[in-house]
Image (cartoon, rainbow, N blue to C red):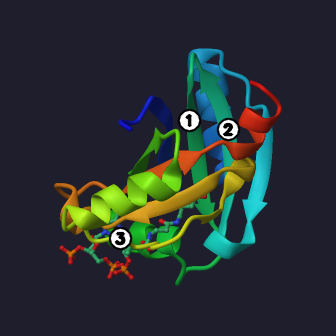
Amino acid sequence: MEPTHIEHIGIAVSDLEASIEIYEQTFGLKCYKIEEVKDQKVRTAFFRIGETKIELLESTDSEGPVGKFIKKRGEGIHHIAFAVKNIEKQLQYAEENGVILIDKAARKGAENLDIAFIHPKSTSGVLIEICEDKKGKQAGS
Ligand code: CMX
């Protein structure tokens, strides 16, 4: 039932291309994908570090979640994503324990993952995403 690993850490940035360059030049990482997630009003860029990814997030709408975050707090860590084996069960478990869910049901996020967010007010001020790779499982990975 418990999360298996940190799937990714989301970092809010003002300029995606400039931040990609910083992560590539500073750490020798290689951005393997840029993807727009219209539903979330963001453009994302991904790097792998072991089993975990770094997801850079640039807002495409100043009133979207990342746009509002940057206006209020500036660039920085936006969320931490836990990989889970069964997102529906994990959501049910959290709700039964009185946690405030932003998403009561999973939806599609970047990298074709099934995702859901938990309100930072329930988790010591940190926005937590839980995600499940249903496609990867079907492919046997
Ligand atoms: N981490 C911690 N706290 C956060 C936060 C974050 N990422 N974003 C907002 N907050 C805090 C604010 O600072 C504020 O706190 P105070 O009340 O103490 O001032 C409070 O939450 C409310 O903030 P707000 O700006 O009024 O924002 P909203 O209530 O409109 O929304 C949230 C906040 C978390 C519910 C909303 O951002 C959300 O639904 N997030 C989930 C979706 C998301 O973040 N998508 C982007 C990533 C997509 C991806 O990874 O692909």
Could you say which is closer to the camera, residue 126 or residue 129?
A: 129
Q: Dot 2 lies on which element?
A: strand
Separation (CA) of disc 1 from disc 2:
6 Å
Quarter where residue 140 is shown? top right
Q: Name the kind of residue labelled 3 in the image.
A: Leu
Residue beneath label 1, please? 54
As drawn, the label of residue 46 is 2
Residue beneath label 3, please? 101
Q: Dot 3 lies on which element?
A: loop
- Dot 2, crowdedness within 10 Å: few (<14), some or many (≥20)? many
Q: In this view, does 87 lie to the left or right of 79?
A: right
- Ligand 1 sits in which quadrant? bottom left
Is 80 located above or below residue 58 in the figure? above
Q: Name the kind of residue labelled 2 in the image.
A: Phe
Q: Can residue 6 be seen in this view?
A: yes
Quarter where residue 52 is shown? top right
First in residue order: circle 1 vs circle 3: 1
Q: Give the mark toward the camera: 1 or 3.
A: 3
Q: Name the kind of residue labelled 1 in the image.
A: Ile
Tell me where residue 106 appears, x and y as whole percent. Answer: 56, 65
